Image: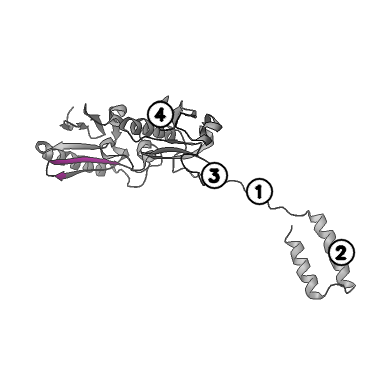
Amino acid sequence: MLGMTEVITRDGAWVFDFETVRITPGSGAHPLRQALGDLAVPLAAIETVVFESDRKGGTLRLRPRRGADPLVQATGGALPTAADPYRLAVDAGAVATATSFAAGVRDARMVAGVPVEPAAEYLMPGPDVPLSTTGEDGTVTFDGERVRLEWGWAASTVKKSAGPRELLLSDLVGLEWTTTQLRFRTADSTPAPAAAEDLHCLRLWGFKKDIAHSALVAAAVLARLPHPSVPRPEPETPPAPGESPDTVLRRLRELGDLHRDGVLTDEEFATAKQALLRRL
């Protein structure tokens, strides 16, 4: 393609056609990068691309705009370096090419007027479903509409006693992912119990495939929830209990009678009257 620029190393290949950065993982890449496969990152989803040099060559690093990629949003910067699909190890012989590549993407962003503000919608697709991941104490599956947690032999007594759990997307307000756990949050899940007893939490082994599969599930769920930029509706506050106007008026008349008969002083009458009016 005319004007196309590329960086090809043992770690993978990045190609830029001035509209999209296409990322292909190398054959020995982390299981998460392999599972994601080829990525097409539109220019509008990119915050920056930089080349960081070191003694062996360096690293080409792409940073998506905040809110543009559900995988980055779900994992919150907690991915191990080797699992990050937006990093490419560059050999010494490709340093000049990688430096030029990064500068070319930055220039194209500037010419295209890509905003620096967080994206208002996901510009990268979420992983395809169905997906599942098995962790230390059970298995999570996601079919695009519901999350199902089933507990294994290493689960706590609390989880085994409760049995499998199923959560609809409409039940969820978010999730938390680390290399050791995947926790689904509902409106009533704060504060959350410890991971071993949380019926919405899968504990993870922290192995490479464990990290890959759980991160994919997290990204797939998050991509189908409202984008973080969408304001979350405030829970409705039930009206404070009070007395009907007729009841308050009747009691005001009674207070007036007691005040007129001298049972209540002026100060006592004023205090009781204000207390009644606050009940409306």
| Disc 1 packing (10 Å; few <14; some 14–19; many ≥20) | few
Kind of residue indicated by mark 1: Pro
Q: From the image, give the main secondary structure of the stretch colored magenta.
A: strand
Which numbered tag is attached to residue 254?
Answer: 2
Kind of residue indicated by mark 4: Thr
Q: Are marks 4 and 3 in contact (CB under 8 Å)?
A: no
Image location of residue 237, percent across then percent down: 62, 49
Image location of residue 52, percent across then percent down: 18, 45
The residues bearing labels 4 and 3 have C-alpha atoms spaced at a distance of: 33 Å
Quarter of the picture containing the N terminus is: top left
Kind of residue indicated by mark 2: Glu
Which-is-in-front pick, marks 4 and 2? Answer: 4
Q: Is residue 45 magenta?
A: no
The residues bearing labels 1 and 2 have C-alpha atoms spaced at a distance of: 30 Å
| Disc 2 packing (10 Å; few <14; some 14–19; many ≥20) | few
Kind of residue indicated by mark 3: Pro
- In this picture, which residue range is highlighted in magenta? 53-63
Image location of residue 113, percent across then percent down: 29, 44
Which-is-in-front pick, marks 1 and 4? Answer: 4
Q: How many marks?
A: 4
Question: What residue did someone put label 4 on?
Answer: 134
Question: What residue did someone put label 3 on?
Answer: 233
Q: Is residue 35 left or right of residue 161?
A: left
Of callouts 3 and 1, which one flags the residue occurring earlier in the amino acid sequence?
3
Quadrant of res 154: top left
Of callouts 4 and 3, which one flags the residue occurring earlier in the amino acid sequence?
4
Which numbered tag is attached to residue 238?
Answer: 1
Residue under the image location 15 percent in, 45 percent down: 53
